[in-house]
Amino acid sequence: MPGDVLVSVDNQPVDAHNLEATVSRMRGEAGTEVTLGVMRHGEQVPIRFALTRAEVQVHTVSGEYLGNGLGYIRLSGFAETTPRELLAVTGSLRREAGKKLLGVVLDLRGNPGGVLDAAVQVADAFLAGGLIVRGTGRVRQARFEQYAHSGDELEDVPAVVLVNGGSASASEIVAGALQDHHRARIVGERTYGKGSVQTVMPLGEGRALKLTTSRYLTPSGRSINGIGIDPDVVVHNTDPKREYHGAGGAVALRDDAQLLEAIKLISYDSIAVS
């Protein structure tokens, strides 16, 4: 509740100047217990809560059927579970459509990135083949190439991708791959431009050196870092808060100019292929 203050973990006081130590003590194996002491306004002594630890399930994919064979898929991040969630959401959209999906809007706005392998698998879901991303660096371990494979759920579905200045890293890998393969048109604003891998080298006595050891390149060889991905269709959103986050959100679909443009484009594309 507002005003509550965490004062102890397993009866040991919390150090307000060492948050990492407090978080570390709260973490543990799923199924084990931890006791939190909370000081609440109006109480003279801390209230103790005995909690059982469990794995945190963070859902990164949501979807909505928009009608007329069109689906909307939003990715808030790229976690290890993201590819499985995408597959489940796609199946749900197909069932709601009652037939083959005619088009999909993939919303990556405000998506800061995450797990590289998840981004590769998401791009692979839309691509029947070809290079997805290349890593380049001085050492052999920093150089790699990731390719798409045929047989995925969304390979035959027309797609438009939404991006903005908050789309970074893994989001840019997906957007860049689909753009370079002319698999999807990109709508919105230039992405953040985070396309590098940093390696931390400890120096001792609490010091460390952070080195950029690899950079991500799109299939055509474009560098993402410091540049970003330019959309095919630029649509500026004057108010970042006016983004549609699903039917239960605070913003109506009709008030999201970028999404409306994406739906218009995907509608044209679906008519062209149907």
Image: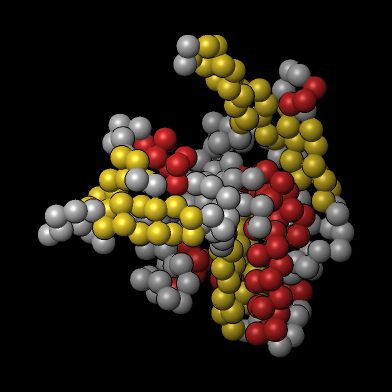
Q: Is residue 188 left or right of residue 196?
A: left
Q: Nearer the viewer, residue 251 or 88?
A: 88
Q: How is the image coloured?
A: secondary structure
* Residue 254 visible in the picture: no
Classify the position of the C terminus by image quarter: bottom right
Q: Is residue 234 left or right of residue 172?
A: left
Task: Residue 166 in the image: state x and y as whole percent.
Answer: 47, 47
Left or right side of 5 for 118: right
Q: Residue furthest bottom?
A: 98
Q: Quadrant of residue 193?
A: top right
Taking 143 as reference, is 151 above or below it? below
The residue at 66%/78% (across/down) is: 93
Q: Position of residue 208 (x, y in %)?
A: 52, 16
Whole-percent x and y of residue 271? Answer: 70, 77
- Residue drawn at point x = 59 percent, y = 17 percent: 201
The quadrant in which the N terminus is found is bottom left
Res. 3 image quadrant: bottom left
**How many numbered callouts?**
0
Q: Is residue 97 visible?
A: yes
What residue sits 47% from the left and 16% below the top? 206
Q: Is residue 118 above or below residue 208?
A: below
In x, y percent, where is residue 52?
Answer: 49, 59
Q: What residue is shown at x 46% (from left), y 77% (from top)?
A: 247
Q: Nearer the viewer, residue 51 or 223?
A: 51
163 or 125: which is nearer to us? Answer: 125
